[in-house]
C-alpha cells in the first residue's frame, strides 16, 4: 500500500532525521512568544529549494506538528501563547502554574496534544484518499466556489469584524494582481515598473507579512522580561486513572478539532474555543473552568492539535488551505512544481502519502521530545529577544536575496512587513490577507476557465450541485455574523421585557 511505502521510506535515516529536526525546531520556536510556527516555516522554505520534494514536505509537516504543540509551553508558564491556537490553554494552564502545578499542566497538555494528533491522523488516513477521488470529478466552478467559501469563512471567523476580514482577503488578492495577465499575456497594474511584470513572489510576501511584521512588533516590546516558573516539582506522565477520567474529553475534543480543521480557512484557534466551550457545557463543575481546571487544558490542547490533521485533508485532497500554515504548505508544493489537490495522489502519491506518514511519526516524536525535554526547552523562553530578532532579520534578508538574486524581492519583503504591522495595529487579520494572496491565482484561473466553457454564463454556479452547495455555505457564512447579532439583541430584548 502507498501509505506503508511512505512510512517505510520515512523510517530511513535522512527522512526520519528531517522530521525529527522539524518537530524539535517547531517545539522550540512555538514555545517562544513572537516566534510563530508560520514564521519558522516561511523562513525554512528557501532552504528546501534544493531538497527532494518528499523530504522537504516531511520537514515542514514536522515543524507544523511541533509548533502547535510547543506553543502550550509559554501559554502555560507565562500566559503568553506562542500561537493563537493556545489562547484557550492560558485560561486554565496559567492558573495551574500559579498554584504550583506547572508540571501537571504541561503533562496534561502534552498528552492531550498527542491524543488529538493520533485520532486526527486516523481520520486523515481514512478520509484523504476517498476525498481525492471525489474531488477529481470537480470542475472549474466547484474549485472557484471552494476558494470563495474558504475566503469568506476565514474572514467571517477571524478576530475582529467581518468587514476587516473581507478587506484583508481582498487586499491579499489585489497584491497578487500585478504582473502578466494569464489570459491576454499583457502587463497589468505594473505602473510602468519593469520589476512588477514578474509579479510578486510568494516567499517575500509570506516572510514579510509574518516574520518582518512580527520582528517590528517585538522590537517595540524588546525590554519585556517574562517571570520564571518552577518546573522542578511534579510528574509529566498521566496515570491510568487520569486516562480514564479524561477519556471522554479526549474523544469529544479530538472529533471537534478534526471536524473544524477540515472546514477550509477556520484554523485550530476556533477549534480550541469550541472544544473548550463544549467541555464546559458538558461538565458538572462549569464554574471551575478558568481557575486551573484540568479538563480545560485537556479540551484546548486536544482540539488545537487535532485540527492540524483535519486541516491537512482539504490541503492534499482539494488544494484548499485549512489554515494559514496550510496556505504556506501549498506554496511549498507549488515551489517544488507539485499541483496541490486531487491529482497529487495520482501524479505524486509519494508526496501525498508522505504528508500522512510524516504527521503520524511527527506526533510520536513530539510526544517523546516534550516528555523528555520540556523542562529544558522551557529555558529558551528567557533568552534575550535582542539576540533572536537580529539573527532572524539577517537570515530573512539573506534568504530572500539568495532565492531570487534580486534586491527587489528584499524591498517587497520589507514593504509587506510594514504593511503587515500596520494591518495588525488596525486589527485587520493577516490570515485572510495571506490566504487571499495564495488563492487568488486559483480563483482567477478556474473562474476564467468556467466562463470560457459556458460563453460567459454564470448558470453553473446554481445548477451544479457541489458548486451551488459551496456558494450557499459562503453566503450563509457571510450573513451569519449579522444574523447572530440580531438574534442576541432580540433575545436580550425579550429578557428585558419579561423582567
Image: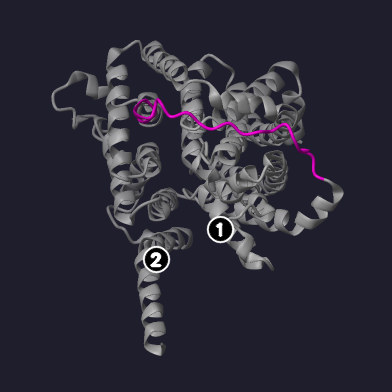
Which residue in the structure is indicated by mark 1?
A: 274
Farthest-out residue, left: 192
Q: How many C-alpha atoms fall within 10 Å of the one at disc 1: few (<14), some, or many (≥20)? A: many
Closer to the camera in the image, 18 or 461: 18
The location of residue 75, given as percent across then percent down, is: 56, 40
Image quadrant assignment for residue 472: bottom left
> Which residue lies at the image location 31% right of the left edge and 58% below the top edge?
458
Judge depth for marks 2 and 1 and give the one in front. 1
Which residue in the structure is indicated by mark 2?
A: 480
Asked if residue 15 lies in the magenta stretch, the reply is no
Left or right: 117 as drawn, with respect to 90: right
The location of residue 489, given as percent across then percent down, is: 36, 75
What segment carries the magenta color?
217-238
Q: How many C-alpha atoms fall within 10 Å of the one at disc 2: few (<14), some, or many (≥20)? A: some
> SS for tag 2?
helix
> SS for tag 1?
helix
Contact between marks 2 and 1 (CB within 8 A): the answer is no
Amino acid at each position: 500500500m502507498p501509505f506503508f511505502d511512505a512510512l517505510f521510506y520515512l523510517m530511513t535515516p535522512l527522512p526520519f532525521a528531517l522530521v525529527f529536526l522539524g518537530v524539535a525546531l517547531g517545539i522550540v520556536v512555538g514555545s517562544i512568544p513572537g516566534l510563530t510556527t508560520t514564521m519558522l516555516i516561511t523562513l525554512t522554505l528557501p532552504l528546501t529549494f534544493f531538497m527532494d520534494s518528499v523530504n522537504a514536505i516531511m520537514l515542514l509537516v514536522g515543524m507544523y506538528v511541533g509548533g502547535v504543540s510547543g506553543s502550550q509551553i509559554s501559554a502555560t508558564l507565562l500566559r503568553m501563547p506562542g500561537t493563537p491556537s493556545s489562547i484557550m490553554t492560558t485560561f486554565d494552564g496559567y492558573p495551574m502554574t500559579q498554584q504550583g502545578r506547572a508540571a501537571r499542566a504541561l503533562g496534561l497538555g502534552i498528552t492531550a496534544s498527542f491524543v488529538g494528533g493520533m485520532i486526527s491522523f486516523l481520520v486523515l488516513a481514512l478520509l484523504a484518499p476517498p476525498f481525492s477521488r471525489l474531488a477529481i470529478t470537480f470542475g472549474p466552478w466547484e474549485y472557484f466556489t471552494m476558494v470563495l467559501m474558504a475566503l469568506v469563512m476565514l474572514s467571517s471567523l477571524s478576530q475582529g469584524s467581518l468587514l476587516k476580514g473581507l478587506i484583508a482577503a481582498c487586499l491579499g488578492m489585489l497584491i497578487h494582481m500585478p504582473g502578466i495577465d494569464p489570459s491576454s499575456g499583457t502587463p497589468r497594474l505594473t505602473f510602468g515598473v519593469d520589476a512588477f511584470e514578474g509579479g510578486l513572489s510568494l516567499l517575500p510576501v509570506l516572510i514579510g507579512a509574518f516574520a518582518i511584521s512580527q520582528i517590528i512588533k517585538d522590537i517595540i516590546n524588546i525590554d519585556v522580561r517574562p517571570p520564571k516558573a518552577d518546573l522542578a516539582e511534579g510528574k509529566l506522565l498521566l496515570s491510568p486513572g487520569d486516562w480514564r477520567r479524561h477519556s471522554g474529553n479526549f474523544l469529544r475534543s479530538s472529533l471537534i478539532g478534526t471536524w473544524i480543521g477540515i472546514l477550509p480557512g477556520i484554523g485550530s484557534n476556533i477549534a480550541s474555543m469550541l472544544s473548550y466551550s463544549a467541555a464546559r457545557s458538558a461538565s458538572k463543575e462549569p464554574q471551575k473552568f478558568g481557575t486551573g481546571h484540568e479538563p480545560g487544558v485537556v479540551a484546548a490542547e486536544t482540539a488545537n492539535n487535532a485540527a492540524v490533521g483535519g486541516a491537512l485533508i482539504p490541503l492534499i485532497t482539494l488544494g484548499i488551505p485549512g489554515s494559514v500554515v496550510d496556505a504556506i504548505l501549498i506554496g511549498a508544493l507549488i515551489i517544488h512544481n507539485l499541483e496541490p489537490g486531487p491529482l497529487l495522489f495520482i501524479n505524486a502519491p509519494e508526496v501525498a502519502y508522505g504528508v500522512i506518514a510524516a504527521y503520524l511519526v511527527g506526533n510520536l516524536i513530539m510526544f517523546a521530545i516534550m516528555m523528555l525535554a520540556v523542562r529544558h526547552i522551557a529555558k529558551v523562553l528567557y533568552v534575550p529577544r535582542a539576540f533572536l530578532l537580529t539573527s532572524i532579520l539577517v537570515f530573512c534578508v539573506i534568504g530572500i536575496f539568495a532565492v531570487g538574486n534580486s534586491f527587489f524581492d528584499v524591498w517587497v519583503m520589507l514593504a509587506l512587513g510594514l504593511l503587515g504591522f500596520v494591518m495588525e495595529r488596525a486589527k485587520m487579520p493577516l490570515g485572510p490577507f495571506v490566504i487571499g494572496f495564495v488563492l487568488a491565482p486559483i480563483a482567477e484561473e478556474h473562474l476564467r476557465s468556467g466562463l470560457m466553457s459556458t460563453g460567459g454564463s454564470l448558470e453553473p454556479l446554481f445548477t451544479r450541485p457541489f458548486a451551488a452547495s459551496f456558494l450557499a455555505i459562503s453566503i450563509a457564512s457571510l450573513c451569519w455574523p449579522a444574523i447572530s447579532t440580531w438574534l442576541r439583541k432580540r433575545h436580550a430584548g425579550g429578557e428585558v421585557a419579561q423582567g
